[in-house]
Amino acid sequence: MQIAGVEPIPEDVRRGYVAAGLWGGVGLRDGVEAVAARTPDRVAVADGTTTWTYRELAAAVDRAVGCLRGHGCGPGTAVLVIAPLIAPAVAVYHAVLRCGGVAVMLDRRSGRADVVNAVEAAGVELIVTTAELATSLQVADLDVPTVSFDHVMECATPSEGWTERDPSLPAAIVFTSGTTSRPKAVVHSLDTLRAGARNMADIVEMTDADVAFLSTPLASITGLLQTHLTTERGAGLLLEDRFDAARSLARLRAEGATVLGGAPVIIEELFRQAQAEDLHELPLRTMALGGAMIPREILEVALDRYGIRPVRVYGSSEVPVSTGTLPSDEGEGRYADDGACAEGTEVRILGDQPGELLLRGPMRMLGYLDEGDNAEAFTDGGWYRTGDLGRFEDGRLTVTGRLKEIVSRKGLKISLTEIDDVARRLPGAEEVAAFGVPDAETGERLALAVVARDVAAVDFDSVTAWLLDAGLAKWKLPEQVVVWEQPLPRTESGKVQRRMLAADGAGSRTFLAPRLR
């Protein structure tokens, strides 16, 4: 798998990562297999239906290696894993790495257009998913061999051993929606993934006594990092595929989760539920907050009532867990900014502060799979342009805003340009533009402004049904459709002024999703 057009990190800096132990020196066997040998009966992963100890996880990974090899998975093979948050998906991910393949990750909520894009972009040679998703996504039409998680887990083919992979080569691909019209394929190596996972483990001070609670998709960078950091620290991992505040809180308590991370709105929901139930203690000892801060009153509940230590982290799919709270930070210093640099991470601010934020470090992605996406992503010296604004003073980072045009719904990022590109083909639409609206439940919700020739023909159900048929994933559908009765506000250069869409009252008719009615 070739990645072209990337400005490399200078060789002397790369050598420094190796010398400091930030790259190399640790093999795959130092993860699942080593923990299985050391503490075989420690619970490794549980998804509410399946619970595996490390002995059982190691056996499942070994079976999966044998099965995937039998289906042609070898060094460099791109394997598309369309996965809900289930234990077999974790085993398959580990197995792809041990075969030397590249795990191309998609969430169960992906649309068919996402699947087609992944197959074509990565040159996928094998697909692993559930039987239900294979049917709903019409995977059979793609002419790519497909097997189910059940089939892989039922395989009795022995792995017959495997060799350690080159940790600097492509290992995993996640897709992120930024400012472009389609999801970008972010390529990571084992070295870069482990650097991000180690940074997170250090920030939350994870040990083998911990249990992490994961409600973010396995196909996200957060999902992959938690998969690595728990196995490499010998901790447990609870997978919560379908979040529900009451049910998820009950499970978190019953199974003793000690580390919580993910979208701030989900964390907020859990603590509001704990308040509603008048709970006086929780097993959690720390929670990692990225992006928007949770409301002050919820933070105080976590601190004062439950004694939970909050930490801040900053990163992205491209440069995961770049900065974060230090163990020595006390009081409001734990969450007043976005923390100090993780080991090996460097920060640069372009121009005056706050200015455009650039990052470089051992966790930086290898690059985007599409050469065209790399052209504007890097500067000389291998610095990654985050698209965010920030201040960096006294060794501490404060992110002050975003340059990227995205909406973050429960931590899942949706490209406004991607929505525009699909919606502009909407029958009868003269102009369309997606924009974000603050939402108490999800943080932000996606709205779509439509200037139509026949305004009476526009309503919520017809617009969202058409977008779904056009291949847009269900989780990317707008939850608010606004019929705009005048030309959309634009800059002199012709760019739509999205903030004015959210503030202006030109839309005389507004349609909302059922949950908002």
Image: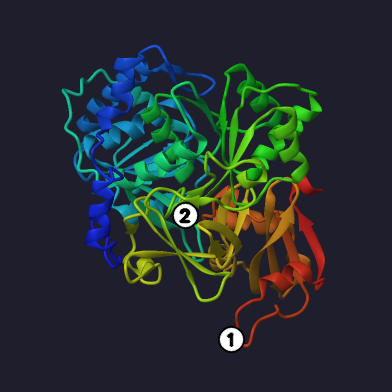
The extreme top residue here reads 41
Q: Which mark is residue 43?
A: none
Say which residue appears at 30% left-offset and 43% top-offset. 190
Percent across and percent down for residue 318 are 42, 55
Taking the image as shown, residue 516 lies to the left or right of residue 332, namely right
Residue at 67%, 49% in the rendered image: 293
56 w.r.t. 475: above or below: above
Residue 248 visible in the picture:
yes
- Disc 1/disc 2 C-alpha distance (Å): 27 Å
Residue drawn at point x = 63 percent, y = 88 percent? 492
- Assign a secondary structure to mark 1: loop
Q: Is residue 280 left or right of residue 91?
A: right
Residue picked out by circle 1 = 493
Residue 179 rendering spot, x and y as whole percentages: 51, 66
* Quarter of the view holding residue 453: bottom right
246 versus 203 height, above or below: above
Q: Residue furthest bottom?
A: 492
Disc 2 element: strand
The amino acid at mark 1 is Ser
The spot of residue 65 in percent (x, y) is 25, 28
Question: Which residue lies at the image location 57% right of the left edge and 26% below the top edge?
Answer: 258
First in residue order: circle 1 vs circle 2: 2
Q: Which mark is residue 176?
A: 2
Q: Which of 401 and 129 lies nearest the eye of the viewer?
A: 401
Residue 509 vs residue 492: left or right? right
The image's colouring method is rainbow
- Residue 429 visible in rendering: no
Q: Quadrant of the N terminus?
A: bottom left
Instruction: Where is residue 283? Give x, y as percent.
Output: 62, 22
10 Å crowding of disc 2: few (<14), some (14-19), many (20+): many
